Structure formats: structure tokens, C-alpha cells
Amino acid sequence: MVSLGTKGFQGRPVSVSRSGTIAALDIGTTKISCFIARIEPGRMPNGQAPVRVIGIGHQVSRGIRAGAVVDMDSAEEAIRIVVDAAERMAGVTVRDVVVNVSGGEPRSQTIGVRAPVMGAEITDQDLQRLIGYAQTNFQPEGRAVLHAIPVSYNVDDARGVRDPRGMFGERVGVEVHMVSSLRGPLRNLEMCIERCHLNVLGMSVSPYASGLACLVEDEMELGVTLIEMGGGTTSLAVFFEGAMVYSDMVALGGNHITNDIARGLSTPLTHAERMKTLYGSALASPSDEREMIDVPQVGEDEGDIGNHIPRSMLTGIIQPRLEETLEFVRDRLDASGFGRVAGRRVVLTGGASQLNGARELASRILDKQVRIGQPIRVMGLAESTGGPAFSTCAGLLSYFQMSPLEASGADDEGGSRGSRNQFSRFGRWLKENF
């Protein structure tokens, strides 16, 4: 199925007519989290309804590797525990969830279509027909479409039109940003959630959701690259003129740094993660040679005398891996051609972005201005759950309001039936909101 982003229609959000609660489920390699939020009355400056989180659940992830399900039973159990904790805190029971996608090798492509209008006024039906053409022309084998986001329109020779409705011309065209993912991993993810007696209301790639949570309006308009640094993957999204125009993923993340520390220092993974969090840095400092760190060895009792290393050795393990990850991101941006569109602004988010020195290292490698992003559009988050690690989960709440979510993006069995249903939903959505 196709989830149509509304930024191509001047960002007018969908009016939420369902129950007054939203449930977002962030399934990552290192942690699984669930936010249950209540839709408050009124409107924020961006046109969306205020959202207040009333239930939070999170725990260490199990059965997930590089964003994909590798152990169905373990993943199911972890999801059940997280959702149950959020439900108990919120005092409600949820049946529908919006889910992120961080694996499945997402692929980004822009499709351009044009259609004649014979001098008549351009209507909602014309836009619906254009989206239908774009979907028909984009049917990648073995992949399911997650997003179909109109990024710009053109009427005759006038390009860069934001909203063509009500205008007159001979021909109207649209460029649609299509984001697809491998169908198998999506179906596994959806099946795992359904085994928890939950319905997948919609899916979003992680950097898109994180961008909706962390980016300010000016950044989205002028151009920005959002880099979501997770445990198993590092994903990126380019926003320009209010819409996501490019998305990609690198199969490297914070867990790779942890594994490098564990192997390089012969220490258990739990201690490697602890050292990375407490003492790790992506940049060297003059005091690193003098500061010593205790390193427990693999297979030895905690009471045994461990190895002692200077902090500089830990930095020497972390920095090359983080540099490699950021260099991959830079190369993907340059190869896509969207590096210039994104301007000189980068926003880092995700758990691995909290590593000391990550922002400075990213600024040097990417040659851009970098800041750390955290959720800014959701109320009710405590300090411990309002940081970069929870950006995706918070962004899914905004994504719920911005897209006409009726079914999962992975429900793509036959293609034609799903497309017809999506087009009819899109038509109803246009009538209800314009």
C-alpha cells in the first residue's frame, strides 16, 4: 500500500477522527519502545493537533538484528512486554499501532508523471489521477512501497508549484518520491506485531519519522539532512521545501562500535557497552593517556583483577568505526545528488548520536553545520525519554497525523487490489480535508 505524505499539498494534516489515543511502536536493534499519546484539543502552529504522551514502555530489544526480525518468538515477547508497560501506565488498551521500518534495504526513487487537463481547472480528482499514474509506473519486484510523497508540481511550463488546485493549464505534472523496502522483512515485522494481537495501522522509515519529530519548519524548507544513528543501522533522509526528497540506509550502527570494543579489549559485550557509554569518545583529548580504565576480561570473575588501559586506547577503537560510518553517509549523499539540495545543515539523532564527540566528528567529515536533534513536537515526555534515542517513536505520533493511514505499507499481496483500495482511500482523504 502507499502512504501519501501531505507536504506536497502544503502540509495540511489529516483530521484525526479515530479514538483520542495514538500508539507508536519503535522496533530497533538495541531497544523497543512504545508511546501511547492522547490527542489534545486545539491546533499547534504547524496545523497539527497537540499530542501528549500518557504511556511509555521500553526495554532492551530481542530477536532484531540490523532492523529486521531474526527470532520471531523473542521479538514477539519483547514487543508484548513493552506495549503492556505502556498500556498499564496510560490506563488504556491499544489495538492499532504505527510502526517504524529500519531494515529491509529501503530504496528511494523519484517518479515524474504528467497528464492533460485541456485548459480546465485543476481539481482534486486530477491530483488523484496523477498519484495513480505514479504508482502504476513504480512496481519494483519483490519490494513494497512505504511512502509516495508528492514533492513538487508543474503546470504547463511553470515549475515548482506547491499547490496546483484551482489553477488552469493544459498539462499538470507531479514528482513523487517513492520509498520502497524488501517485502519479506516488512511482512515478517508485520506478522510479529500481529502475533501480539495488534493491528499495524501504518509504517514509516525511521529517518522520516525522526525528522518529523526533531526538525523545525525552516530546516525542512531550506534543506537539511537528518541522520538517524541507531544500534544496527544508520539511516538518513534529506528534507527540502517541506518534504522528504531522499532516504537511504547504511548497515552500520552503535552496536558495531560496541562489538569492536569487546573484540579489541577481550571484554564482555555488557562491559563494552558500559565503557562506550561512560568513557567513550569520538575525539581524542590531551588527558586520555593519563586516565586509566578498568577492563574486565572475558570468562573471568568480576572479582578478579582486570586489565587497565589508557582511555586513548578506547578512543582509538571508537573513532575509526564512527568515521567509517559517517564517510559512508557522505558518499551516499554525494552519489545521490541531493547533497547540495540539503544545504549545509545536518541534524544527528538516535541513540548512537549521544556518543561524546559525535557531533564534532560529523561536522568535520561531512563539512556541514551539525546539531543534535531531539523530539520537539510531543508533550509529556520525561527527560529520560525525551532525548535523541526516542526521536523515531515520538515522530511516529506526528506521522500518524500527517498521513492518511488506513493500512500497513507492507500489505501488498497482489498489487492491483491494494492499489485500487489505496486510490479510493486517497480520494476520500482529499474530500475530507480540502
Image (spheres, grey):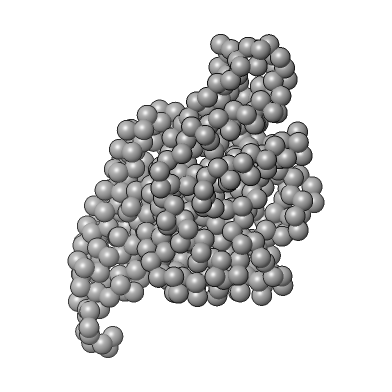
Q: Position of residue 194 (x, y in %)?
A: 56, 66
Horizontal side of residue 170 vs 281, given as left or right: right
Where on the picture, by quarter, is residue 91?
bottom right
Number of marks drawn: 0
Judge whether 252 appears above or below 276 on screen.
Answer: above
Q: Which residue is drawn at 30% across and 60% down?
A: 256
Residue in the foreground of this view, choosing between 299 and 425: 425
Q: Position of residue 315 (x, y in %)?
A: 26, 58
Q: Residue at x 62, y 29 (%)?
A: 129
Q: Which residue is drawn at 37% across and 54% down?
A: 233
Horizontal side of residue 413 vs 8, given as left or right: left
Report if residue 387 is visible in the image. Answer: no
Q: Farthest right residue? A: 41
Judge whether 303 appears above or below 151 on screen.
Answer: below
Q: Position of residue 240 (x, y in %)?
A: 51, 31
Report if residue 48 is visible in the image. Answer: yes
Q: In the rendered view of the protein, which quadrant contains the C terminus? A: top right
Judge whether 393 appears above or below 76 on screen.
Answer: above
Q: Residue at x 57, y 53 (%)?
A: 408
Q: Where is residue 38 in the image (x, y as percent from the top left)?
A: 72, 59
Where on the picture, by quarter, is residue 339?
top left
